[in-house]
């Protein structure tokens, strides 16, 4: 399995092409990316019944002003909320797929449900695989959680998968044991989970393991690029970017 070439030639809008009044991970942000000809990166969290929702945070407060956790909220209650500063709702993955409809590459990130990047991934990977059945268009799946990627790959072997990766500094990942953080920083799970690409933090592109993987044929994307200057530097290593805050 290899990552389709379109993922290496089309800049990918981080959480859609969002801007003031066009919230991240919204249908409006997806429309804006499609109109601009960008690929789309989106995040998946589960609703209380396991329905895959396009939403980044575990807590709803930042993005909706509503206290509570998305995984403890029903799809009906989520549908009644509006994303801050807009009339946009939290879309289900099914609604997001219906809108994108294969027009641009779609890079889906499932958020870790274990809390420690461990094996307790629940049924979210399988639910995402189910939502993608019959989807016609370039799509790839990634996660910081290797076990999530492995579970999805087992459920949907035809969809390219990769790992979202970084240096796993303790300050950013205090809940993850030190030994596990070291293993994750060395991307030791790459072959085990069936990955064909990584999406690596721009601040850690000097990691020798990134060069080694690319030399071995892995595709290398990078996140999150926020200026043309950052893009120019990142492209010395990465083949494509996930960006926000400017027109790539």
Image (tube, helix red, strand yellow):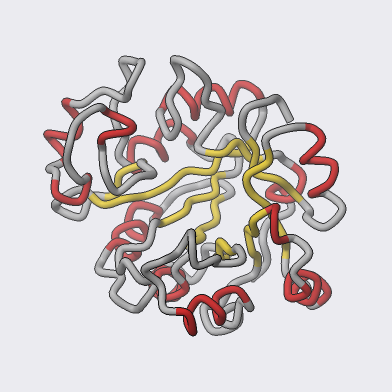
Residue 159: give x, y in percent of width and height.
Answer: 52, 63
Residue 161: give x, y in percent of width and height.
Answer: 55, 65
Vertical placement of residue 111 versus 177, above or below: above
State left or right for residue 68 relative to residue 239: left
Q: Image point 71% across, 47% down: which residue?
A: 6
State left or right for residue 165 relative to residue 27: right
* Residue 146 or residue 76, whichever sits in front: 146
Residue 157: give x, y in percent of width and height.
Answer: 48, 71
Vertical placement of residue 234 versus 180, above or below: above
Which picture quadrant has residue 53?
top left
Q: In which quarter of the image is the C terminus?
A: top right
Which picture quadrant has residue 84?
top left
* Residue 216 or residue 233, whichever sits in front: 233
Q: Image point 78% across, 74% down: which residue?
A: 208
Q: Image point 34% across, 52% down: which residue?
A: 131
Vertical placement of residue 76 versus 198, above or below: above
Q: In which quarter of the image is the N terminus?
A: bottom right
* Residue 178 or residue 233, whichever sits in front: 178
Residue 43: give x, y in percent of width and height.
Answer: 43, 47
């Amino acid at each position: 399995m290899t990552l389709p070439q379109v993922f290496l030639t089309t800049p990918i809008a981080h959480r859609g092409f969002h801007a003031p009044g066009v919230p991240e991970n919204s249908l409006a942000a997806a429309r804006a990316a499609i109109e601009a000809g960008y690929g789309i990166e989106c995040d998946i969290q589960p609703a209380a019944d396991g329905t895959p929702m396009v939403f980044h945070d575990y807590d709803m407060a930042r993005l909706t002003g509503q206290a509570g956790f998305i995984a403890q909220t029903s799809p009906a209650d989520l549908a009644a909320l509006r994303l801050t500063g807009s009339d946009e709702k939290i879309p289900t993955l099914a609604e997001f797929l219906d809108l994108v409809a294969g027009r641009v590459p779609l890079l889906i990130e499932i958020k870790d449900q274990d809390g420690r990047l461990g094996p307790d991934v629940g049924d979210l990977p399988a639910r995402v695989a189910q939502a993608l059945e019959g989807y016609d268009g370039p799509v790839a799946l990634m996660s910081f959680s290797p076990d999530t990627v492995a579970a999805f790959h087992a459920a949907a072997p035809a969809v390219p998968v990769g790992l979202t990766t970084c240096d796993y500094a303790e300050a950013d990942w205090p809940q993850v044991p030190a030994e596990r953080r070291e293993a994750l920083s060395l991307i030791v799970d790459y072959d085990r989970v069936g990955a064909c690409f990584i999406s690596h933090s721009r601040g850690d592109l000097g990691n020798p393991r990134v060069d080694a993987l690319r030399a071995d044929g892995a595709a290398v994307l990078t996140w999150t690029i926020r200026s043309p200057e950052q893009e120019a530097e990142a492209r010395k290593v990465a083949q494509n970017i996930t960006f926000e805050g400017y027109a790539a």
